[in-house]
Amino acid sequence: MVLFLCNHNAGRWQMVLGFFTHLAGDRAVAWSGGFESGTEINRSAVAATAGAVPVPGDYNGDGRTDVAVWRPSTGEWWVFDQYTLILGGSGDVPAPRDLNGDGRADPAVWHPSTGVWDSQVWYAGYGFLPLSYQFGVAGDIPV
Ligand SMILES: [Ca+2]
Ligand SMILES: [Ca+2]
């Protein structure tokens, strides 16, 4: 059982509760509550999730899945409490995975029309470096 208790309630705990419930399934039960509630949902929270697709993964390599969303209309990746970056866009398929074997999921998208993969791979000491390669053809599904 998990309790999310937040102050200045502005919609963020609802996001976390939704992601937690999605990821935990029947393995855990979560409750949420807050105090000093706002009168509207935080605009940045609304903007961050508008049209967003969940892209959970272990983005920091701690062995636990992290909450993350990708917005196709802008290509924005929002990895909760870690970073944001721009990669891909409408028509792409998000496919985050650990591309360099460091235990951290790397943001990646696949372009169905060309079979090209684009990613931003994190290298300690260097930061994110772009990686692009062609693999697959139109009609394939990234796995
Ligand atoms: Ca993690
Ligand atoms: Ca990696």
Image: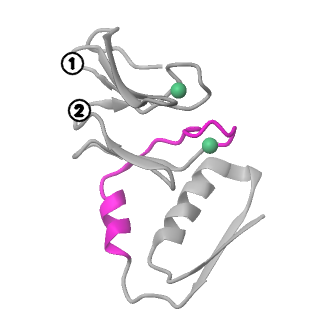
Q: Residue at x 28, y 14 (%)?
A: 115
> Split into 4 quadrants, where in the image is the N terminus?
bottom right
Queried whether the magenta region covers residue 4, the answer comes back as: no
Element on which disc 1 rests: loop
Give the main secondary structure, helix, strand or loop, of the magenta stretch: loop
Indicate whether 113 appears above or below 9: above
Q: SS class of the residue under badge 2?
A: loop
* Residue nearer the viewer, 86 or 109: 86
Q: Which residue is mark 1?
A: 113
Q: Is residue 53 magenta?
A: yes
- Density class for disc 2 (Cα within 10 Å; few <14, some 14-19, many ≥20) is few
Residue 19 is marked as none
User: Which residue, given by chain and number where applicable, does mark 2 sit on?
Assistant: 91
User: Which residues, given as a range, are shown in magenta?
Assistant: 42-64
Ligand number 1: quarter of image: top right
Locate residue 31: give its quadrant: bottom right
> In this rendering, does residue 78 appear at all?
no
Question: Could you tell me which residue is drawn at 58 percent across and 19 percent down?
Answer: 101
Q: Position of residue 85 (x, y in %)?
A: 34, 43
Badge 1: few (under 14), some or many (20 or more) residues near its Cα, within 10 Å?
A: few
Q: Residue furthest right?
A: 1
CB at disc 2 and ligand 2 closer than 8 Å: no
Please identify the quarter of the rendering in which residue 72 is found. Answer: top left
Residues at badges 2 and 1 in contact (C-beta under 8 Å)? yes
Q: Is residue 13 left or right of residue 25?
A: left
State the image coordinates of residue 100 (x, y, percent, origin top left). Answer: 52, 19
